[in-house]
Amino acid sequence: MDRNPLLAHSDAPFGAPRFDLFTNDMYLPAFREAIALYKKEIDAIVADEAEPDFRNTILALEYAGEDLRNVEGIFFNLLEADTDEQKQAIAEEISPELTEMGMYISLNETLFSKVKHVYGNHGELGVSEMRLLEDTYLSFVRSGAALEGEDREKYRTLEEELSLLELKYGNNVLAATNAYTLHLSSEEDLAGLPDYVKDAGVQTAKEKGLEGWAFTLHFPSFSPFMKYSTRRDLREQMWKAYNSKALGGENDNTEVIRKIVGHRISISNLLGYETYADYALERRMAKNRETVEKFLDSLMAPSLPVARKELDAILAYAKAEGFDADELMPWDFPFWSEKWKQANYQIDEQLLKPYFRLEDCISAVLGLATRLYGISFEERTDIPVYHKDVKVYDVKDEAGEHLALFYADFFPRESKRGGAWMTAFREQFCKDGKDLRPFISIVTNFSKPTADDPSLLTHGELETFLHEFGHSLHGMLSKGVYPSQCGTSVARDFVELPSQIMENWAYEPEFLNSFARHYRSGEPIPAEYIQRIVEAKNCLSGYLQVRQLHFGYLDMAWHTLTEVPSADVETFERTVLEPYRTLTMVPCSAVSTSFGHIFSGGYSAGYYSYKWAEVLEADAFELFQQKGLFGGEAADSFRKNILERGSSEDESVLYERFRGRQPEPDALLKKLGII
């Protein structure tokens, strides 16, 4: 090809990215060529001598920079899912240039004057067009367009530095995660571990060139070790390693956090806001920090007593079973809560995992989308992927027409960050009368197959799969027009609704019966196991709710500051969370130093969104229960009013159109059995 493959028209089916052609040395040239093209498009809008109007200014801006969006969509997704040192170096080099490109637009006085003219003289516009105009105007204002002189230059410098700090934070977390390995060489050290956990430990050791067994801080390795190991000393060691990631040492994030917080405060102040939370929440459903704080408090007040009762019950059970300490330490809780759950519900991961073979779960989750929305999935082997583990599907609508590409990347590796997420290599939008369909990706860290067994999911991992697949449906079913309004481009506290509502099916007997088979015998999952899953649904609901609220309070505490605190990160965190404490706070541990959601992942002053959306989904799922769980009126309305619409209208309007009313505030507390 004459042109960089990252920028050239792809000859793969559906114009899919040519991952098989991309090399690291192509990214910087592609970025810089795309930036140059973007600047030419902006310059043309600025130079247009015609009176600014919606078409020649707002629409021209909306569609400018398509090449750059495509390169960013590929590179930054791979930076998370399949990174290496060269990609990380490229990210650090290009991030200031991308920030500068953003400010080339937002700080362009002539361009802003054109947008401002259209904003004040727009005439008749449709709902989506008016929303696009308002969003465009406010994005300029919120990106420094109204600043002058020294303030404008200060804003530019702060934004450039902040982009690098956020990158550094994420790189430190990944490096700290990969830096730790618990290497065991004696069978005695494996006491309590199920065979599947030991087998995974053998495989991890082999991958690292070690003898014996190896366990890491990646969740599929860390979590079962903490639940089943009877070696309290080793659980303590693992817990402390996990909860001190990037807290001191070579990959320290403590000073990075202070700088990020300081930069966010300074930027917010320059733009006329007292705190970063005031700035961030203005364009979300919650609108302001007072609403968020009241919301968190309204959930914490009834949940904290329930959580503490649950902990008392587990401690009493542990003591009856021979635990000889006066309190549960954080490394005791996973172990004893799992045993308590087994005793009360006769259910545990070891019992259920054989029934959740990954391949069966894939078929079931994709099949659920077919039942709900009539879409189908055909695995393709002729479409390039970025790693051998990745599967890709052609998603078709009810008529058999192409709807989207769906990439699925399930297994952990050192080049992938922890957790699970959905993203897009290209979002859906319409241009020149053509509907450009999306390339959607789901990334998880499920346990790999071993020499003896296939990949088997826990029931919790099935929930995670359904959650991220809900985000994927939001992207795949999008039927918007303007790029900034399509798919998951919605308010942060609305975006989790499509994902969290999907988790409900993990507890529906009809769904579980449709696929859960023992991977060896082929026997269906026993009815009593499903009954136990349903009965255990709200097991530890108080504790788990409080844990999530902890993250929400911590996020708001960092982002309602008016100055960088004098206290160190650990002390600051301890002070914030002490009123809501359940387990003992351990010295030399902290959440903040690896809390990527709020320091490098887009959820700053937004972690409350998970709970906010849980209220929405608890209320919304009631309609499915009333109108049909596997298609019909509720699914049709959810697709039409939520999944297809993006942010083409205010999210509250979209929800009310789906539900017929605004959500009931107590829906979540009732669902969890807290009230």
Image (spheres, rainbow, N blue to C red):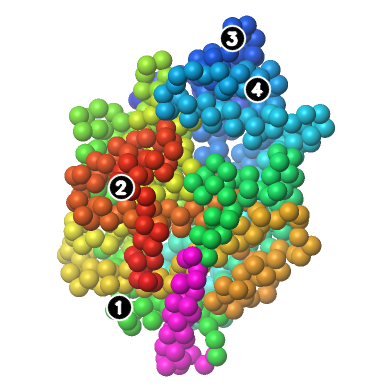
Tag 3's secondary structure? loop
Amino acid type indicated by mark 2? Arg
Amino acid type indicated by mark 4? Phe
- Circle 1 Cα neighbour tier, 10 Å, few/some/many (<14 / 14–19 / ≥20): some
Mark 4 or 1, which is nearer the eye? 4
Q: Position of residue 279 (x, y in %)?
A: 63, 44
Tag 2's secondary structure? helix
Tag 1's secondary structure? helix
In this view, the residue in front, 330 or 576, is 576
Q: Which numbered disc, 4 or 1, marks the residue that appears first in the sequence? A: 4
Amino acid type indicated by mark 1? Tyr
Q: Which numbered disc, 3 or 4, marks the residue that appears first in the sequence? A: 3
Numbered badge on residue 129: none
Q: Give yes or no for residue 267 being in the magenta stretch.
A: no
The answer to whether mark 2 and mark 4 are in CB contact below 8 A is: no
Q: Which numbered disc, 2 or 4, marks the residue that appears first in the sequence? A: 4
Judged by its main secondary structure, the magenta piece is helix
